[in-house]
Structures are given as C-alpha cells and as structure tokens.
Amino acid sequence: MKFLRAFFVFSFLFASSANSQNYNNGVVSSANKLASQTGIEILKRGGNAIDAAVGVGFVLAVVYPTAGNIGGGGFMVISFPDGNSTTIDYREKAPYLSTRDMYLDENGEVIEDLSSFGHLAAGVPGSVAGMLYALEKYGTMKREEVLSYAIELAEKGFPMEKELANGLKNHKEEFSKFDGSKQLFAGDWKKGDIFIQQDLANTLKLISKHGRDGFYKGRTADLIVEEMERGNGIISHKDLVDYNVIERPALYGNYRGFDIVSMPPPSSGGICLIYLLNILEQFDLEGSGFKSSGILNVMIEAMRRVYADRSEFMGDADFVRVPYKTLTSKEYAKKRFTNFTPGKAGNSKDIGPGKDLIKEGDNTTHYSIADKNGMLVSVTTTINDTYGNKVVVRDAGFLLNNEMDDFSTKPGSPNIFGLLGGYANSITPGKRPLSSMTPTIILKDGKPFMVTGSPGGGKIITSVLQMIINVVDYNFSLQAAIDEPRIHHQWFPDEVLYEKGAVDKVTLNVLKDIGYSFVPIGSFGRIDAILFNPDGSMSGYSDRRGYGEAIGY
Ligand code: DON
C-alpha cells in the first residue's frame, strides 16, 4: 500500500522528536508514537484536526489495545478556528435487555465482577459511529484514506513495545477464558514481537468500505451478537443498529479569565472540573504558595464536595435531571464552600451532597490535536478497565468494553474506581453510564490556549484540574505542569491519595495533624496535551507516566 512507505519514512524522521519544541503547523499528543505519527502524517497531507483525530483513534485501536478501541466509546470536544465549539458524545449505551438490578443476586447483593468482567459487562459500543460522524461532518478527507493507516498496521503488524507485551502477558489468564481473546492475545509476548491482527484488519476494511454499517450491521454485527450468545451477553442486533451519536453543546466555564470548554453529561468531567475551578478561584493560589498546606487544605475540601455532588446529582442528562447550570455556577461554588474551615480537615460522613442548595428542577486514553488553522480536538476514549471486559469478539479481532460498571450497580456500592452513585446513575436501557472523562479545551480571548485530558477513572478530573492550575496559577511549563506529582480525593473513601513527591514531608505532617488521612499510590492520570505560546506557536507533551509521544511540525 502506498501509505506504508510514507509511514516508515515518517517514523524515521520523527524518531527523535523532542516533546518541548515549538511548532507552527500542528501537534498531535497521544499515548502511542505510531498513533501520533499517523495524526501528523494526516495533517501534512492536508487533513484538518478532525481527520487527524479520527486517524489517530482508529490507529490506537490497533497499536494500543489497552484502551484504544472500536469496541468502546468516547467523547470529542472540538473548538473551531472561529472560536465556536461543539462536542460529540459516542459513549456506550445500556443494551435494551439491561435492568437496574442486573448485577445483583437474589438477596440484592452485588455479584462480584459481573459488571466488569465478561460479556454482560459490555455496553453498546459507540466509537465507530462517533468517529465516523465527526469525520463526515467536520473532516475533509475520505474515510478510506483516514482508515488506511490503521488497516495497514493491523495487517502488516508493528513491533510491540515492552509495555504492551508485558500488559498482555499479565492478563494471559483472563484472556484464556474467552476463545477470541485467547486466540489474539494469550501469548508469551516480548518486546519487539511483530503483532499482526488480521481479523481486526478485516473488520476495519468493512468499516472503511461500508461506513458505520460495516460495524453495526452485516458480518461485524453478526460476530458481536454471536460472541454475546457464547457468554450470556445481551447486546442484540437492534442495540447495534439503533446506536446513536449525540452532538451536544459544549459546557463552558471561566477561570481567572480563561475560557474552559469541556464535556457535558453523560460525562461528569466538565461539570466537576468547572465546579472545582470555581471553588479554587475564590483563593489566591499563587500568593499562597505552591502546594502549601493551606492550598492543599482548600483543594482537598473542594474535591470532597465536588465528588459528593457527583455521586448524587450526575448521570445521563437525557434520562435524569442534572442541575448542571447550578453546579457550574460561581454562586453555588461559593455557597458550597461556606462550611469550609481553614486549617481543619472535613469529614465525608458529615459533608454529604449539597442537596439543600440545588433548586433546579458519568482503560481509557486521551489525545489532543491542533492544526495550523486553529482547529482543536480533544478526545478521551475508553473501554473502561484495562482491556475492557477482556472479551475479544471472535473472528472480528477487537475487545469489548466493560462500561456497564460505570453505572451505579447498587446505591452506595462502589464501582471499580471506588466511586459511589445513586438513582441519577442507575441502569436503564438506552441510558449512558456516567463518565469522568474530561476532554477539555481552554481559550484565552477567543484564541487557542490549551488542549488537554487524561485517562484515570475517577482521577481524571483531579489530574486535569492540577495540570491546569499548574499552568494558569503557577506558570509551569507544559511538561512540568503534567509531570508534577498529584493528589486526589473523591469524597469516599475519605482519604487523600498522593503520588510520590506530591506533598513534601513537613506539609504532609501538618495536614495529617489537622486530621487528613494520606495514602500513597503508584501513579495516576496520563495527560496528553498541547499548550499555545504567546507568539501563537504550540508545544505538546505526553505524560511521563505513559509511553506516548507528542509530535509536531
Ligand atoms: O468513563 C469513565 O469515567 C471511565 N470509564 C474511565 C476509565 C478510565 O479512565 C480507566 N483508565 N485509566
């Protein structure tokens, strides 16, 4: 194929691309180098940021099966050169045969792993429909050309990175439980092995030829439904044919004069991010000192309140009333923080959701793309857990998601990220599970300033928050803002998780003394972002916590 040659010449040219350079024509920051190279190649061929985003999305499904997908869903936030924005919701949906209590036993207890492992954990996938919707409406290139990169990588193979080889090896036992997964993934992989995925290439060719019908109808749909039948899953042909993409107005906030453009429900990401920023804006972060005990006290208490509200009020706004105007208002953020006592740790048992204040009456990867015309695309996509529900659709070569676990399976019972939920996020056929994905774009005076987002389950929101304040309040470089160790609090469990080095020893002791319980955690969040410099040039950076790469030209 003619693209292959170009691809490898290109790989060579950018093999040593540095993350901190400035570029004028475009940047792609993603969790995988081959995916970022594809995006740049598409931009160089004259495609816009949407063409690049869709090319990157399909390539991630091939080279980054940990989270890249066609069997999952996602959110895309777009900012156009004229400053207008939109979002595309291609979140998974609960199948028609789903029921509120489908993961409970006859005693009303949650059946372990049922919502997260195996066929019944899968929601109806939205990624293919969503990416093709974006391409047809806002892209400029032909579907066949955009998909050719992914098809070629699936068919010809690519050398496995050590992270992928180890990841697959570590999940061998789980993969061995399902025919399709066993055939595709359950090997003794090692770095440098060439990973060829012919079944996936065939599926991608059907999508290339027939558009969304190549996935939601015909052979691929038949294979998904057959896979469901093998494992007592419930996704039907009707679920697939009826899957709908929803274009939604973006959610807007403002933080110290910067315009925040983010994802509305069914993500909680945009609401929570804006709500957190609205609380932090009441304090002089810069003047109070970076990560001083006073500021950490404020941040943790803000997180406690925001995640309490998340559990109570947020769900798919097409099914439940989500008071997002209130939740993202400056007034609410003020009222909600009146019970904050500086120098004192709050208690999640006492600080519930702000019910009386509401009067109005939910493994993942992120990529950020900017083109030379100022079109910005921020995409977070997921199959939820690492390798989703671990089930590869036999003969179709792709993993399914376990997004049903993002619903509240039972009020008060935590999901795999320890997040709580209630009625607003209960299971109903056709409903989309509440997400924490926070694909975000920031504009300053109508001009591009930042494109950002992250994986990390419930910790996505707090990862994105800290990266933003590190740039806006503390003037960190993009790399420093992302690399800086993070903290996280999500109401329950009532503890502050922290990455190594996030809080210095003295401050840690001060905070422990006033009542906080601190728990160290390996690392979380993997931000892929772009920052615009005052001269209009841009730089990109891919989180040190992952093994992606930001490339520009
Ligand atoms: O939509 C959500 O919030 C989750 N399904 C995201 C999962 C995730 O980020 C896992 N990756 N680390």
Image (cartoon, grey):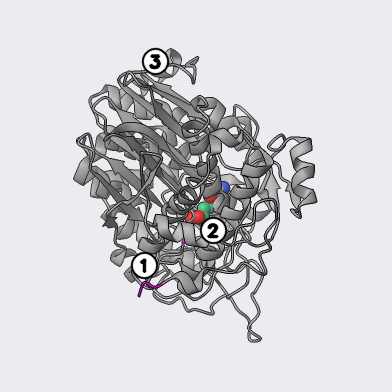
Query: Farthest residue toward the bottom?
Result: 106
Name the front one of labels 2 and 3. 2
**In the rendered structure, which segment of residues is drawn in magenta?**
359-363
Disc 2 marks a residue whose amino acid type is Phe
Q: Earlier in the sequence, mark 1 or mark 3?
A: 3
* Residue beneath disc 2: 337
Residue 512 position in % (x across, y down): 78, 49
- Circle number at residue 317: 1
Choose top left, top right, bottom left or bottom right for residue 24: top left
Badge 1 or badge 2: first in the primary sequence:
1
Label pair 1/2, CB-CB below 8 angstroms: no
Residue found 36% across the figure and 18% down from its top = 23
- As shown in the figure, which amino acid type bears the numbered disc 1? Ala
Give the residue displayed 45% in from the left and 28% down from the top: 34
Q: Which numbered dot is residue 56?
A: none
Tag of residue 9: 3
Residue 45 lies, in percent from the top left, at 25, 23
Q: Tell me if mark 3 has few (under 14), some (14-19) or many (20+) residues whose alpha carbon lies within 10 angstroms of its own.
A: few
